[in-house]
Amino acid sequence: MTPPRRNPNKRLQTLTLAVTVALAVALGGIMYLSLTSLPYLATSPTTDPSFGALNACLLSAVPERLGFAVSRDGASVAAWSPRQLVVCAGTPPVATVFPRRAITQATWDGEGGLWIASGGFDGGTSALLRLENGEFVERGAFAPAALVGTAKGVVGLEPSGQLIALSSAGEVSATRALPTSRNVHLQVSGDGALVALYGGGRFAVVDAVTLESTPAEAPCPVKNVWWRAGVPLLLVECIDLALEINALDSHSALAEPRRRIPATLVGAPGLYIQSCDVLPCTVEAPR
């Protein structure tokens, strides 16, 4: 009996199917590499267009970082580890090392002063300090849960819920009690004059010196906040809508729904930054 002959068309279809599957697998691999590798390269801290040199300085001086802070003019960056704080500044950047332990927060004020909060170490007391003439000087005996630099000093939120405004000399200009500090975040405006409080079911905009609230309101639980550069406007994102709110009155307008990257506005340069390997990397301004 003569064996049946295979249909050439079927063999061609099988070969075509195999080639198609192989091409699909290869294309999937290329897309995977593009989605996983390119974003990392785009946000590599040493290639950042604004902070690349400063980040390279910090990577060499403090490889194990717990946090960072950017000066309000964008010219200096500080980062800290469990045992020291390093400030990189200048062209080319030079690292200055300060042996400090138990740092929990750091920020820069509008007068160029670096503030750090220490939570105590080996039974030591909590303290808020400001760098002056190369030495850290105590400006308060507490360690805030949140801390932001303002035009003339800082605003800190104690774990108890007490909001405190201090001048660069450490003088308390105002205090204000909040129901809680849990999940409350602080964001300061580009000129350092206003501070937005959000999270934990709260939203308010306060004066950075008096802590008095402005009329600004949000009609929904706020998830993220972005200050607009150069104007007293905030972009506020809730779970199902986004608003642009005037920080000085109650006027607001709906914003286009889109995916936005959480970021912080750096004062004078108008840059937006996010954490990139615990170092600052610039991101696109929110639209």
Image (cartoon, rainbow, N blue to C red):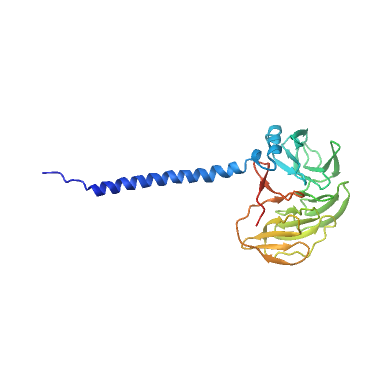
Give the total number of marks visible in the rendering: 0
Q: Position of residue 80 (x, y in %)?
A: 73, 38
Identify the residue at horizontal 42%, vertical 45% (top origin): 25
Quarter of the image where one finds residue 81: top right
Identify the residue at horizontal 62%, vertical 40% (top origin): 44
Identify the residue at horizontal 28%, vertical 47% (top origin): 12
* Residue closest to the far left: 1
Q: Between residue 127 and residue 62, name the one nearer to us.
A: 62
The reply to whether residue 127 is visible in this rendering is no
Q: In which quarter of the image is the N terminus?
A: top left
Q: In which quarter of the image is the C terminus?
A: bottom right
* Image side of residue 153 versus residue 204, left or right: right
Q: In this view, does 40 lie above or below 165?
A: above
Q: In this view, does 272 lie above or below 76?
A: below
* Image side of residue 24 versus residue 263, left or right: left
Quarter of the image where one finds residue 246: bottom right
Q: Is residue 202 above or below residue 148?
A: below
Q: Where is residue 79 in the image (x, y as percent from the top left)?
A: 73, 39
The reply to whether residue 164 is visible in this rendering is yes
Q: Position of residue 277 (x, y in %)?
A: 64, 41
Q: Between residue 139 and residue 78, name the one nearer to us.
A: 78
Q: Where is residue 112 in the image (x, y as percent from the top left)?
A: 82, 44
Identify the residue at horizontal 66%, vertical 59% (top origin): 237
